[in-house]
Amino acid sequence: MRTTHAQALMSTTQESDQTKKRLWITVIVIAVFSSLIIFLLYKNLSDEDQLRRSQVQEMRQEINELTSSIKALSKTKRALTKSRDSLQQNVDYIWPMRSLVYNAKLRDKVLADLELKPGDACRLKADSSIVVITDVIVGGNQYTYFVNYRARNKKGESNDYSPFELEPLKKKSEE
């Protein structure tokens, strides 16, 4: 019995040694895996932290560039505002006379296309008397306009005539 008891005791100690070895191996494997997982998490977190820091640094550089751009644009805006204000003073002065300016431009444009100009002598078709054109009168609105000549006769009287009532004098070289 002793041998069986001794054998049983030996087999129990061998089994307990094997279970202890398995337990130690399991503990060591778990420790290695957990340290590996912790290492990988730490490395991943440090890489993310480094990436975040580089992104923050890039953003700061971009913010600095944008700030300098804003300062430059602010200076440009200030200069434009100053010149606009000085031009606005001129426009404010001329603005009430805009219709007068428009009419003068229209008059000059029409006058460029006319055959008779102020200072020209011409003949009235009605009675063949000679008159001198003193002014061109242009009027109307954005849809229609009219042209009349103001002319002075030999007596010094001024009258308005339409372009159809006047004809240019023939020059002596043409006769």
Image (cartoon, rainbow, N blue to C red):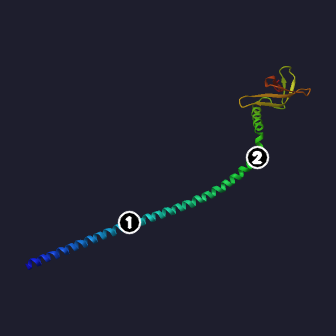
Element at badge 1? helix
Q: Nearer the viewer, residue 92 or 144?
A: 92
Residue type at numbered disc 1? Leu
From the viewer's perspective, tell me whether residue 166 is left or right of residue 36: right
Q: Position of residue 60 (x, y in %)?
A: 54, 62
Name which residue lies at 66% across and 54% down: 76
The answer to which image quadrant residue 4 occupies is: bottom left
Q: Position of residue 32 (x, y in %)?
A: 31, 70
Name which residue lies at 31% across and 71% down: 31
The disc at residue 41 is 1
Q: Nearer the viewer, residue 24 or 91?
A: 24
- Most distant residue in the right direction: 155
Residue type at numbered disc 2? Asn
- Most distant residue in the top direction: 126
* Residue with the mark numbered 2: 90
Q: Nearer the viewer, residue 130 or 7?
A: 7
Q: Position of residue 34 (x, y in %)?
A: 33, 68
How crowded is the residue under tag 1: few (<14 C-alpha within 10 Å), some, or many (20+)?
Answer: few
Q: CA distance from mark 1 to mark 2?
A: 71 Å
**Quarter of the image where the C terminus is located:** top right
- Most distant residue in the bottom direction: 2
**Quarter of the image where the N terminus is located:** bottom left
The answer to which image quadrant residue 50 occupies is: bottom left
From the viewer's perspective, tell me whether residue 170 is left or right of residue 34: right
Q: Is residue 3 above or below residue 148?
A: below
Q: Is residue 165 above or below residue 81?
A: above
Dots 1, 2 in contact, CB < 8 A: no
N-term-proximal mark, 1 vs 2: 1
Name which residue lies at 17% across and 73% down: 15
Q: Is residue 124 above or below residue 29?
A: above
Element at badge 2? helix
